[in-house]
Amino acid sequence: MATTSIPAADLESFATHLQSSTRVLALLGAGLSASSGLPTFRGAGGLWRNNDPISLATPEAFSRNPGLVWQFYSYRRHMALQARPNPAHYALAQLAKAKSGFVTLSQNVDGIQHQRAGHPASQLHLLHGSLFDVKCTSFYCNYFQRDNFTDPIVPALAIPQESVQPNPSSTDVTGVEATSSLYGAMQSTNNGSQASRDLDISDAGVSIPQIPPSQLPKCPHCRDGLLRPGVVWFGERLPEVTLQAVEKFIEESEKIDLMLVVGTSARVHPAAGYVDEAREKGARVAVINTDIADTPGGGLEEDDWFFEGDAGVILPEILKSVIGEISMPGLAQFPTAQVQ
């Protein structure tokens, strides 16, 4: 099984500082959930059906083609529901339980950190909303539903399944064997003995239907407006309650001991500003990322840390001095860290 190396001196100095830290702020990005199998849609190849995901994450895109936008978000909802929390999710949840002065600000919308890893809700703030919240698009309606885990949210958004195919024969030229093979496969599928497989609709080569607005989620309150995902799209205001909660934590902290930056470059505001604000309060910064170039805009200082590698491997190891060993279902399937 693959391992990630952590320099012993860095681990020791970080662990010592973590143990004495009482006020800790964490900023989480898409890299946190990468080892849970969720795509980050970042860098080379970060497209969905040849679309830049950013181009689908706007109110204008929803107005132009609500069917395509809903297919994109329904795919992400489905993927997130299939994913399992990785050790980093559990490690952060355990740290929150161990330190009441630990607050987490997440840019992720996948719902894994709180709903399934057990992170205390009072210590977790979602900057970009959630895939599982929905709200009405009608100007005159304020309907909002939290934690809608129905998958698919409407039948038209079901992920298409792989169709049963005949098994070619190298000897039979009559088609009898292929027909028998196809019939058997169809029977086993109908009997539930053969699991169907989702098609990867992120691949533009996989055909998907054009869904008319009449088949998309409708508001149950006004019965007129379309529902949309409750995420923050580009050009929209971030949730005021989240911004106020984080600012309150920073302002009320006479000193912030530690800032964790996990799976994000932290270069886009307001996220980037929180690193600077934490520094002004005396925080040392620890970055956990697979890309050595993904450091906060202000760079790293001499007494900061950069742990290069998968957050799912790194975090359980560097937090171990406070949280102990992680216990979680399926732990053996994840890679481990090695201290150099």
Image (spheres, rainbow, N blue to C red):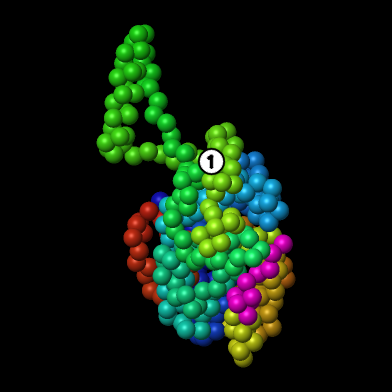
- Depth check: give the residue in front, 58 or 42: 58
- Taking the image as shown, residue 282 lies to the left or right of residue 149, namely right
- Residue at image position (38%, 68%) is 326
The tally of labels here is 1
- The type of residue carrying mark 1 is Ile
Mark 1 neighbour class, 10 Å CA radius: few under 14, some 14 to 19, many 20 or more: some
Find residue 57 and report its horizontal and vertical position in percent. Answer: 65, 54
Please state the extent of the stretch shown in magenta in the rendering. 235-244
Find residue 52 and report its horizontal and vertical position in percent. Answer: 67, 47
Task: Give residue 150's quadrant in the image.
Answer: bottom left
- Decide if residue 208 is in sight here: yes
Residue 240 sits inside the magenta stretch: yes
- Taking the image as shown, residue 59 lies to the left or right of residue 222, namely right
The residue under label 1 is 201
Q: Is residue 259 above or below residue 46?
A: below
- Depth check: give the residue in front, 267 or 336: 267
Q: Is residue 37 above or below residue 239?
A: above
- Taking the image as shown, residue 291 lies to the left or right of residue 194, namely right
Find residue 178 and report its horizontal and vertical position in percent. Answer: 34, 18
- Residue at image position (69%, 64%) is 236
User: Outermost residue, top direction?
Assistant: 173
Residue 10 sits inside the magenta stretch: no
- Residue at image position (36%, 59%) is 331
- Depth check: give the residue in front, 128 or 85: 128
- Residue at image position (51%, 71%) is 11
